[in-house]
Image (cartoon, rainbow, N blue to C red):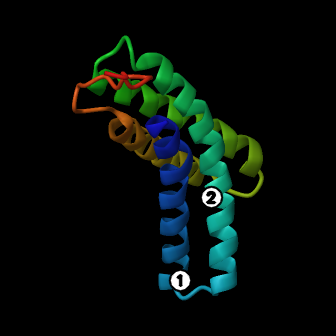
Amino acid sequence: MKRAFVFLVAGPSVVALIAALTVVSAGGPSGFASFLATIFFLFTFAVAAMAVTIDGALSCDFSIPLRASLTAIIGAAASFTLASYLFHCLLPPLVLSLFALCGAVIMGACSLLAHDYGGRQRAAVASAV
């Protein structure tokens, strides 16, 4: 549950907040900032949905640094592919490569945040003793 929350709620929310704050601090209208934040939230949600499945599958077999790196690579590939498909006629290739960089950073950070660093296993059902 923690992994799904971090990837599907916290990650896209941070991206949307950063996008909105960037537009507002640059002097853009607040209506455009909320529209751009919504677009980036949905875009990041789609990428995170792909990355959370991969990260969940890798969580049992790989160490934390390797899993975070592989999840970051998946995030970069997914975000670049999705951005190229959606925005290929609107944005130059350099801007599309920034989508890959941001996807790698966000999905790698989500992978690190979703790990249980306490090392304890939680019981699925509490004992009645």
Instruction: Indicate the secondary structure of the residue bearing disc 2.
Output: helix
Q: Residue at x 63, y 85 (%)?
A: 30
**Does residue 78 appear in the picture of this structure?**
yes
Amino acid type at mark 2: Phe
- Residue 128, given in percent of the width and then of the height, sits at 37, 23
The image quadrant where one finds the C terminus is top left
Q: Give the farthest residue toward the top.
A: 61
The picture quadrant where one finds residue 49 is top right
The residue under label 1 is 24
Q: Is residue 45 above or below residue 36?
A: above
Neighbours of disc 2 within 10 Å: few (<14), some (14-19), many (20+): many
Q: Earlier in the sequence, mark 2 or mark 1?
A: 1
Label 1 CA crowd tier, 10 Å (few <14, some 14–19, many 20+): some
Q: Is residue 80 visible?
A: no
Position of residue 25 measured from the top left corner of the image (x, y, whole percent): 47, 83
State the separation of the CA atoms marked 2 and 1. Answer: 15 Å
Q: Residue at x 65, y 75 (%)?
A: 34
Looking at the image, which is closer to me, 119 or 15? 119
* Residue wearing tag 2: 40
Q: Nearer the viewer, residue 62 or 3?
A: 3
Name the element at disc 1: helix
User: In the figure, is residue 9 to the left or right of 88?
Assistant: left
Total number of numbered discs in the rendering? 2
Q: Nearer the viewer, residue 117 or 77?
A: 117
Q: Amino acid at mark 1?
A: Val
Foreground pick, 46 / 79: 46
Residue at 75%, 47% (x, y): give it. 86
User: Residue shown at 77%/52% (left/top)?
Assistant: 89
Q: Position of residue 28 (x, y in %)?
A: 60, 85
- Mark 2 and mark 1 residues within 8 Å of each other at the beta carbon: no
Give the x, y percent position of residue 120: 25, 25
